[in-house]
Amino acid sequence: MDQKEYTIEVENLCKSFGKLEAVAGISFRVEKGQIFGFLGPNGAGKSTTMRILTGYTQATSGIARICGFPVASEPHDIKRRIGYMPENNPLPLELRVCEYLKWRARLKELPLRHRSKRVDEVMELCDLTRARDRIIGKLSKGFRQRVGIADAILAHPEVIIMDEPTIGLDPHQVIMIRDLIASLRGKMSVIISSHILPEIEMTCDQVIIINGGKIVGKGTPNELRETFIDSTIYELEINGDLKDLLESLKNVASNLEVAQHTEADERGFSRVTIRIPGRHDYGEKLFSCLSNNPLIRTKSLRMREAPLEDVFLAATRRSWETLDTDLTKEPESIASKTKEKKVSTPVQQ
Amino acid sequence: MRHFITLLRNEIWKLLISPSTYIAAFLFLLVMGFLFQLILLEYASDPKEENPSITFFQLFFIPVFFMVPLLTMKSIAEERATGTIETLMTTPVTATEVILSKFCAGYLYYSLLWMFTGSFHILFYSFVQEDSLIDPYPIFGGYAYVAISGGLFLSLGIFASTLTRSQLIAGIVSFSLVFGFIVVGSFLDEMALPWIDQPRWVEILANHTDVLQHMRDFSSGIIDTRAIVLYASCSLAFLFLSILILEYREGGC
């Protein structure tokens, strides 16, 4: 029996804008306290899905539940349970940071006795205390992003939905926001979308990759790697000829290939990246092979995990290939549909 | 309606801190002061029996044409263009609270501007000859009409603003609706084609929608309840339509 508590449940969700199917039957569940990442190219349907979850946009069909409440029939109940930071982080530019957050606290029905304390708390958490009396319109983009994040977490919501929260932030601020989001793990369920893939990888427990309104990959970053990456990558630092290296490594795997190599440095060492099809640990064989070859001096050898970027590219490429296959099967019926999708998906973002 | 006061306070605060509020108020009072002065100059050169206050109120539509679109065009359209409507409508507020707060803030500002024009009459009566007959009722009637009609004109403006995300289009639609209500409503019976007999119902309708006649009646001390019903019901209808549009487009509830 499934004992897990899910704060977000999405079943077969669809959203069409005229003939364009922005979200085409996606389903996923987010556990309580989990940080969930949305990945996908522009126009994939990430923002539309997030808007449906907030009750701002109505789905064409399917069910979305927040904390057990259906979004479509009980939008008022779910709005008390969510903190939302939309794409581009819209803010009233004429208000001061403190004024804005106090107003939002009143709208979000924070009890009067906790209001000022909580506003001070979120300003402290988001490093906004020194900007509390500044006009939002005169703040830098980084500060504005933090005002948006402060607003999203203000009322202790059970679910936080953030559309590209770290866009426009400098590396210090990105680390701060990453730590802030990580600190919410276990307390609130967080959905974030981002184009900054290392961000998603470092922050999220679960990731879904959306393309063309459909889920093309789902799982932890490691599960996604196993699904989409079918090769093992090693990085070596060697002093010697590349041909000798290849010759010697053929004994390890005949289909091994050099993915990348750099020019030798002043000490004669160059960095070489090799790719071996299939996911196996070749570390010991590589070590023994390299140490037995007198023509090559090895400084380092390490296995490299495929970055999420490769997973993302592989997943989205595979989904387009599926579409292309469909096109060749049913040229007339699907061709028009896919063309519409490819042409018009960026509009919804 | 528990968030109405919070939203209204915020709307009023935004009006108070915006320089455009004071610029619009200055221009309004400048135009109205200029009109009042012209009327007094006209009376000085050619004395008339009618109270100058009545003539002043009969020109009420001049500021209405530019003030109502200026006041209301940004209410929803600007929020939609900047995206702040998304953060607003994903909090536990309802579309009714949002529309009513914007309407009430605009109405308070509009009423305040007209209240300032009361100083013209005070100044005028403080300088007239002591034996002049001072009749305050046309002034009360005139302001009552401005208050009642203001509700309708602002609701037309708010309605126009809910239709679009462009402030310019909202302003043009708002001007067209207000212009249509005042000018077409006042001259409806004269708009029939000369070679076609005027249907009876057009004549009856024209009697009800003659905005200029309503103003003449109110500023003469005749409080016609039919006009009050017309303005109140139309205001409510347009506010209701605005709420429906906001609910439909922005998922308010």
Image (tube, helix red, strand yellow):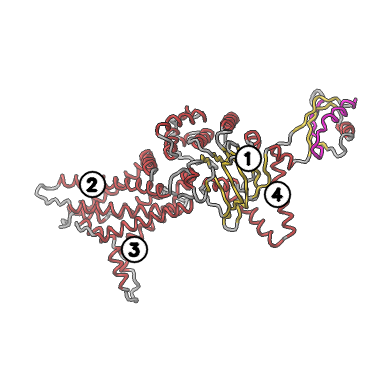
Residue shown at 19% from the left, 45% from the top: B122
Disc 1 versus disc 2: nearer the observer: 1
Q: Is residue A28 above or below residue A120?
A: below
Give the alpha-carbon distance from disc 1 to disc 2, as whole Å: 59 Å
Residue A250 placement, left or right of A237: right
Disc nearest the viewer among 4 and 2: 4
Output the chain of dot 1. A
Disc 4 marks a residue whose amino acid type is Ser
Tag 4 residue: A319
Q: Are marks 1 and 4 on the same chain?
A: yes
Residue, disc 1 = A195
What residue type is disc 2 on? Gly
Q: Secondary structure under badge 3?
A: helix
Mark carried by residue B148: none
Q: Position of residue A65 (x, y in %)?
A: 55, 46
Query: Is B140 displayed left or right of A257 in the figure?
Result: left
Alpha carbons under labels 4 and 3: distance apart: 59 Å
Does residue B128 appear in the picture of this structure? Answer: yes
Dot 2 falls on a residue whose secondary structure is helix
Image quarter of residue A68: top right
Taking the magenta stretch, the answer to whether it contains residue A237 is: no
Magenta extent: A268-294
Report, in whole angstroms, how far the alpha carbon at label 3 lies from the one at label 2.
Answer: 29 Å
- What amino acid does circle 3 point to? Val
Identify residue type, mark 1.
His
